[in-house]
């Protein structure tokens, strides 16, 4: 009895002592520390509005979207992480691997969830501190509800039991590709929840991403300014005798000096015969006097890509045969660009360019697509079966490739589609043969 009383007294005393201590709030890293750091490249409200518009188009049901997974490998140094573009466009969460988005348009209360992996303090000692759940995490991300990823299955199942429709937002993959994680989860839920159907809504998100808003266009224009700086540095700095890799270093340094934050893709610099390989992966070739040099390289800003190709002579002057081929490629580009406006189809643009090559008897030397959309991905989301809308940003990039003639020529520019035509966005970079020669003649 005395022992029991003593124990109660001791416990009561411990409780009283604990209650007397000051209450400590949840400890968060200060601003600028920890991950997620916030949303990028825009504040949370931009992404909240995008999700609102998507949910309005979905109308009801449940939509699940997985972010990119953590890079895998055995190296002690992690590979750079790149977020899934659909996920980044809807959430602005670009620094958090293995995140998951769930939308429930038909729900009255909680309509959007962000799921993040569980914390691991031991891993964080090696990598980066991660935020605990709480108000600060919701403030940084702009999400109504943030939970741990272990709860995704149960939340989706509970929502599906009420809404009975699961929206597939993509990605659409071929039959030989691995099954998308979202379809795997939908299949499991549907097998356990009678009456639930899976709806293909992938074209909705693709269509939304296709039309760029003013803030997106501003970032693309900044990236184009940096890209122009790099291409012109290459034209100015090239000298016969240097290597392709040395020229690439000059170009990429120009991107950085012009405000570029990264490369939109791995730069291609091919001289002479090497330029006839469409996606040339070398770099050790020597640049010879009389060679044409094909440079397909571009900067990115705020995660938004650009894509520009220029072809120019190593010595600053096209010979007669080179100029004739170059002018033919330019004519094909202009034939397609003259038809580009809201409502046209990609096929018709491609045929306009091909007709130029057919008439010249050189159609067999043009064997790739005419162009593509550009945005968060350098080859951005796009359904070619639909007409191109106003506000889309796309490339037109015809080319001719001949290993027999030891040359490849491609001219690639970016265009903003309008209701009545298209604006060439990359006007700062010399493009015609005369413009290229005049610019290169001014080299010191």
Image (tube, rainbow, N blue to C red):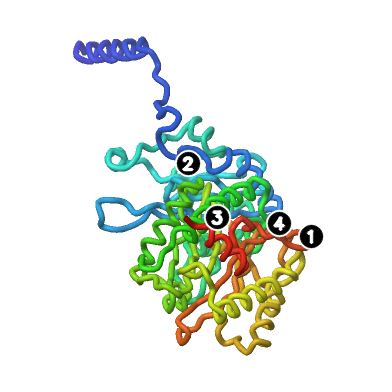
Judging by the rendered image, the residue that carries numbered circle 1 is 419
Cβ atoms at labels 3 and 4 below 8 Å apart:
no
- Mark 3, secondary structure of its residue: helix
Indicate the position of residue 230 as horizontal and vertical percent values. 49, 55
Crowd rating for badge 4 (residues with CA inside 10 Å; few <14, some 14–19, many 20+): many
Mark found first going from the N terminus, 4 or 1:
4
* Picture residue at 53% right of the left edge, 62% below the top: 441
- Mark 1, secondary structure of its residue: loop
Would you place residue 28 above or below residue 104 in this image? above
Judging by the rendered image, the residue that carries numbered circle 3 is 228
Crowd rating for badge 2 (residues with CA inside 10 Å; few <14, some 14–19, many 20+): some
The answer to whether residue 293 is left or right of residue 330 is left
Mark found first going from the N terminus, 1 or 2:
2
Would you place residue 382 above or below residue 160 in this image? below
Give the CA distance from mark 4 to mark 1.
9 Å
Q: Which of 354 and 330 is in front in this view?
A: 330
């Amino acid at each position: 009895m005395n022992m029991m009383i003593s124990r109660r007294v001791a416990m009561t005393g411990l409780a009283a002592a604990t209650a007397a201590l000051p209450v400590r709030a949840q400890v968060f890293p200060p601003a600028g520390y920890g991950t997620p750091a916030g949303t990028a490249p825009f504040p949370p409200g931009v992404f909240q509005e995008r999700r609102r518009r998507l949910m309005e188009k979905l109308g009801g049901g449940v939509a699940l979207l997985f972010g990119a997974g953590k890079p895998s490998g055995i190296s002690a140094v992690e590979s750079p992480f790149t977020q899934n573009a659909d996920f980044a466009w809807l959430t602005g969460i670009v620094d958090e691997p293995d995140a998951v988005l769930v939308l429930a348009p038909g729900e009255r209360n909680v309509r959007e969830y962000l799921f993040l992996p569980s914390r691991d303090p031991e891993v964080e000692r090696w990598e980066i501190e991660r935020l605990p759940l709480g108000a600060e995490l919701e403030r940084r991300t702009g999400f109504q509800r943030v939970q741990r990823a272990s709860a995704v299955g149960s939340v989706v199942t509970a929502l599906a039991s009420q809404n009975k429709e699961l929206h597939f937002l993509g990605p659409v993959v071929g039959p030989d590709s691995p099954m998308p994680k979202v379809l795997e989860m939908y299949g499991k839920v549907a097998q356990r929840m009678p009456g639930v159907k899976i709806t293909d809504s992938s074209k909705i998100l693709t269509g939304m991403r296709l039309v760029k808003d003013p803030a997106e266009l501003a970032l693309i224009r900044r990236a184009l300014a940096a890209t122009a700086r790099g291409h012109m540095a290459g034209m100015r700095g090239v000298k016969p005798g240097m290597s392709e890799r040395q020229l690439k270093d000059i170009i990429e340094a120009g991107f950085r000096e012009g405000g570029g934050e990264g490369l939109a893709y791995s730069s291609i610099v091919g001289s002479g015969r090497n330029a006839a390989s469409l996606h040339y992966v070398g770099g050790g070739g020597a640049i010879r006097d009389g060679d044409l040099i094909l440079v397909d390289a571009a900067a990115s800003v705020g995660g938004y890509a650009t894509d520009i190709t220029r072809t120019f002579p190593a010595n600053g002057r096209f010979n007669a045969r080179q100029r004739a081929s170059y002018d033919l490629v330019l004519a094909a580009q202009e034939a397609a660009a003259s038809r580009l406006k809201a409502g046209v189809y990609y096929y018709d643009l491609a045929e306009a360019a091909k007709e130029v090559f057919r008439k010249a008897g050189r159609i067999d030397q043009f064997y790739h697509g005419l162009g593509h959309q550009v945005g968060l991905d350098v080859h951005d989301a796009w359904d070619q079966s639909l007409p191109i809308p106003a506000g889309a940003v796309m490339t037109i990039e015809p080319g001719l490739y001949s290993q027999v003639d030891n040359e490849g020529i491609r001219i690639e520019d970016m265009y903003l589609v309008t209701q009545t035509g298209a604006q060439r966005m990359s006007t700062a970079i010399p493009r015609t043969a005369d413009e290229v020669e005049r610019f290169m003649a001014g080299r010191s």
